[in-house]
Structure formats: C-alpha cells, structure tokens
Amino acid sequence: MQYPGIESKRNGQRNFLLDARPIIQKSDGEIVPDMNFGRIWDIIDRIGQGHQANLDVLAVLFLRIAYMIGYQHNDTEYLSETINVITGEVIESSMTRFCWNSLILDPDVVETLGDSFGLLGGVSLEGFLYYNDLLAQNEDCKYSYLKGQQWDFKSGRINNCLSHLTVIAHMQGHMGISELINKFQHGGVAPLAQNKFNEVCGDLVIQE
C-alpha cells in the first residue's frame, strides 16, 4: 500500500486524508499499472469469454470479499518505508504496528482456477483477488473516516464488490445491457441485490 492516495489531496468535503493506493509489484520488480473499475471489469469479461462455467465460482469469491467471509485478524508490525517516487530511494524505514483483517483464500480453489485462467492483466488470479481486497479495505477506510459513527457499512467494500457480481450477472445472461448501464448511471456503483445471489452463484450460496 502506498500513501498518500489520489483522493488524499482532493478539495472539499470528500477529501479522504487516509486514502491509499494499492500497488502490485511482480517478482521481477515491475509495477503493474493501477486497476480501476474499468480494468477490473475488462478482466472479468475476459474470464467470462473463456471460462463461462467458472463465473459462479468467481462471483462467490467476490461475495466472500464483500462480506469479509474467511478473514483472519492480524495485530503485528510491518515494514514501513518513505520512498522518493521519482528515484526509488528509500528515505526512511521503520516498523509500524497495524491491526487489520486479511483475506484468506482456499489454496486449492485458487490453484485450480489460476491454472485455468492464466494471467489476468499481467497478474495471477491470486494477486488479482488480493488487489481487489486491498481496494475494498481502502474504501472502508475512506468511508469510516468520512462518516465516523454514522457509517452504516452500505457504502464501501460491500457496494464495490457486489457491483462486480452485477457485471457477472450480465455476462451470465441474467441481465440485459440496457439494465446494466442504467444501474451504473444512477450512482457509479450497482451492487447486486441479495435476492439475486443464487442466480449468479448457483448452488454455491445458500440463503437462509
């Protein structure tokens, strides 16, 4: 995670001081270009074109990220570095205590799907999912800072991740293109309704 993020310096009420920027760095040191909603949906679209039968599993993975199912609580110290982004020089280095909840992925599921999907935008499926989780963590941080005790959790990670399910619903044929566009036109995000989870996730999700 790189701080500050783009929205840390925004003027007005929606200036998210705690905004950060998730970054993927490959083993060879290459930094992967940032992924916005458009890039993420392009990747989901490519998965759907080549692996339609696995879209329900992908939907469940995003659903688990949305509701933080199977996460692990951590309270430990992490390396924190102040870096000159132009030269790459490390100006200062220290250990910072950080309490957070991390995504735990089923290794068998990730390995099986990862081998099938191949690289997604230059990264593995595992990296793609962890990146989406960090985006969700960042969204929660921003809205928690903005709304404080009034935050109802409806904004943030849940809306973002369930919007991916809406895109998947369209790719599965459960939603027409006009309905899809209309949903996103009204607010930028379009979380899939809970009563539609079974359509998208099949029998992998049981609602009680």
Image (cartoon, grey):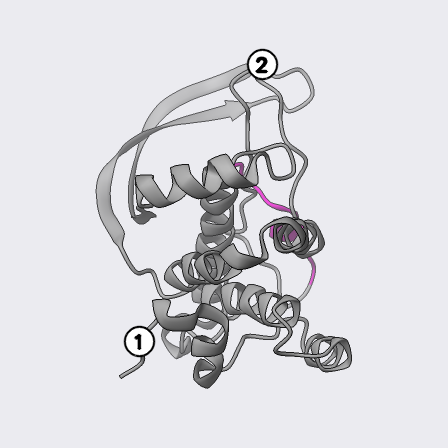
Which element is circle 2 on?
loop
Query: Does residue 127 appear in the picture of this structure?
Result: no
Residue 131 is labelled as: none
Which residue is depicted at the point 41% across and 40% down? 112
Q: Position of residue 79 (x, y in %)?
A: 36, 26
Q: Position of residue 147 (x, y in %)?
A: 46, 72
Would residue 181 appear left or right of 123 to someone viewing this image? right
Which residue is depicted at the point 52% across and 70% down? 159
The residue nearer to you, when weighing 169 against 36, is 169
Would residue 102 appear left or right of 115 to someone viewing this image? left
Residue 9 lies within the magenta run: yes
Gap in angstroms between the C-alphas marked 2 and 1: 51 Å
Residue 193 lies within the magenta run: no
Would residue 39 appear left or right of 178 to someone viewing this image? left
Q: Quadrant of the C terminus?
A: bottom left
Residue segment shown in magenta: 1-11
**Residue receiving disc 2:** 89
Which residue is depicted at the point 41% across and 20% down? 93
Would residue 197 appear left or right of 30 to someone viewing this image? left
Q: As shown in the figure, which amino acid type bears the numbered disc 2?
A: Glu
Q: As shown in the figure, which amino acid type bears the numbered disc 1?
A: Ile
* Image depth: mark 2 or mark 1 in front: 1
- Residue contact at pointers 2 and 1, CB within 8 angstroms: no
Q: Position of residue 75 (x, y in %)?
A: 22, 42
Residue 121, compared with residue 164, is above or below; it is above
When asked about the image quadrant of residue 88, the answer is top right
**Residue receiving disc 1:** 206
N-term mark: 2 or 1? 2
Mark 1 burial class by Cα count in 10 Å: few <14, some 14-19, many 20+: few
Q: Main secondary structure of the magenta part?
A: loop
Which element is circle 1 on?
loop
Q: Position of residue 155 (x, y in %)?
A: 50, 72
